[in-house]
Amino acid sequence: MKKIEHHTSGLNGTINIPGDKSISHRTIMFGSMANGKTTVENFLPGEDCLSTINCFEKLGVQIEREGSIVTIYGKGLEGLKESSTLLDVGNSGTTARLMMGILSGLPFHSVLIGDESIAKRPMKRVTNPLRQMGARIQGNQDGNFTPISIQGGELSGIEYHSPVASAQVKSAILLAGLQAKGKTTVEEPFKSRDHTERMLKAFGVHLIEDGCKVSIEGHQKLTSDIHIVVPGDISSAAFFLVAGAVAPNSKVTVKRVGLNITRTGILDVLQGMGAEISYTNIVDDVPEPYADITVESSTLKAFEVSGDIIPRLIDEIPIIALMATQAEGTTVIKDAEELKVKETNRIDTVVNELTKLGANITATEDGMIIKGGTKLHGCELDSYGDHRIGMMAAVAGLVAKGETSIKNAEAIAVSYPTFFEDLESLLG
Ligand code: SPQ
């Protein structure tokens, strides 16, 4: 149980946010598929990314890690070998779904398992298009839930219109497409994060991108001897950017935050709600740009969060909801049904926990409505094993009068193992 005290003297200082989780996963996967050495700087040593390392080690890849420096000695797709044990993805949806795409094209049998939360997350969204490509996938409820068993083999390219904007669905299909005969195209309703596309290009893979549509020709090889610097995770930074905006007497700088446009919806919302926000040391790096971001205590107003911005901030909705409780007016969040299939049903868990604190918040079918300007009071909260709910609860605890305690706070280590140290350093 973690305890957080109400804080009035503000958050002040500068922090280095750990590496981006989505990008860190992909460095291990693509480095393992390439033939040669890949070095990674500022890798996120969070539990999810360690699960990805563990899976690829079981597939025979040599991976060395010293803190946030990782070296992967890939031997190409042909170097990946059948594991004699189960591949455990832990709590990581990204590991499960992207690996399904990779394993579908490899000539051996694999079984993916995960924790209790993973066992409830739908895999059919990936199983279905992969089966259309020829993949042989079995699993609970006709391949919808783990354990998932994959007998890899030959695949053929497809043109797939995804019903959801999901980088995991898109990436799984592209990674299968890389191994398939012919061309594979994925089209999604709105553009989801494009780290897979950017990193595949850095590994020398040719892709054709056209709005929400991406195509890949099969049987391409990933080049090697790549050095990747992972920018700070904007989804982790979001908790401190919002904390700096809502807590009085605060000025927080977060260094080297990834600014990939498919992830920066949170910055648009902070700006739209009137947060005092500024950018310095902007590096327009290929493949992923980054900058230092400073936020100061601000007077916030309500904002509508809907439509094509949703995939650009899907993981930040819990902390946006908390920010909305402190803004003037009514904030509406809609078109966000995808929240129901994350580590928890994040519509339910956000509404439950913020209601306990005294917020005026109502769940809707595809989001939530928050009447702002409420005074929160400390109480016992639960992360329900969801890292983002745990971090939202911690920031809420700073704002709420009295003491807030958080059950299952250890879940935060999935994406941000040093979260409480960084929080302490800003509280001085
Ligand atoms: O990996 P996992 O467990 O799915 O993690 C989450 C998160 O909050 O960290 C979602 F619960 O992030 C996803 C994100 O929501 C990471 C991700 C990726 O790296 O490709 C894409 C998003 O999910 P989706 O379903 O839209 O593709």
Image (cartoon, rainbow, N blue to C red):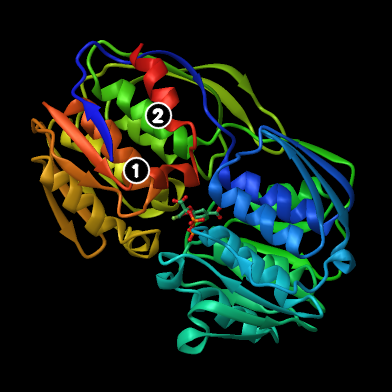
Q: Which badge, 2 or 1, is on the more N-terminal residue? A: 1
Badge 2: how crowded within 10 Å, few (<14), some, or many (20+)?
Answer: some
Residue 316, percent across and down?
Answer: 38, 43
Name which residue lies at 25% across and 55% down.
349
Label 2 amino acid?
Answer: Phe
Q: Which corner quadrant of the image does residue 6 belong to?
A: top left
Residue picked out by circle 2: 420
Left or right: 363 in relation to 384: left
**Under 8 Å from ligand 1: the CB of mark 1?**
no
Instruction: Name the foreground residue: 94 vs 84.
Output: 84
Label 1 amino acid?
Answer: Ala
Left or right: 322 in relation to 23: left
- The disc placed on residue 339 is none
Residue 338, percent across and down?
Answer: 37, 62
Quarter of the image where the C terminus is located: top left
Instruction: Name the foreground residue: 280 vs 248.
Output: 248
Quarter of the image where the N terminus is located: top left
Please give the count of numbered marks on the rendered protein.
Answer: 2
Dot 1: what SS? helix
Q: Eyeballing the image, is 80 above or below 124?
A: above
Residue 209, percent across and down?
Answer: 68, 56
Q: Eyeballing the image, is 329 above or below 60?
A: above
Q: Eyeballing the image, is 104 above or below 226?
A: below
Q: Is residue 90 visible?
A: yes
> Between marks 2 and 1, how big is the CA–CA gap?
10 Å
Name which residue lies at 60% across and 28% down.
290
Name which residue lies at 8% across and 30% down.
375
Dot 2: what SS? helix
Badge 1: how crowded within 10 Å, few (<14), some, or many (20+)?
Answer: many
Instruction: Name the foreground residue: 111 vs 130.
Output: 111
Residue picked out by circle 1: 409
Q: Are marks 2 and 1 in contact (CB under 8 Å)?
A: yes
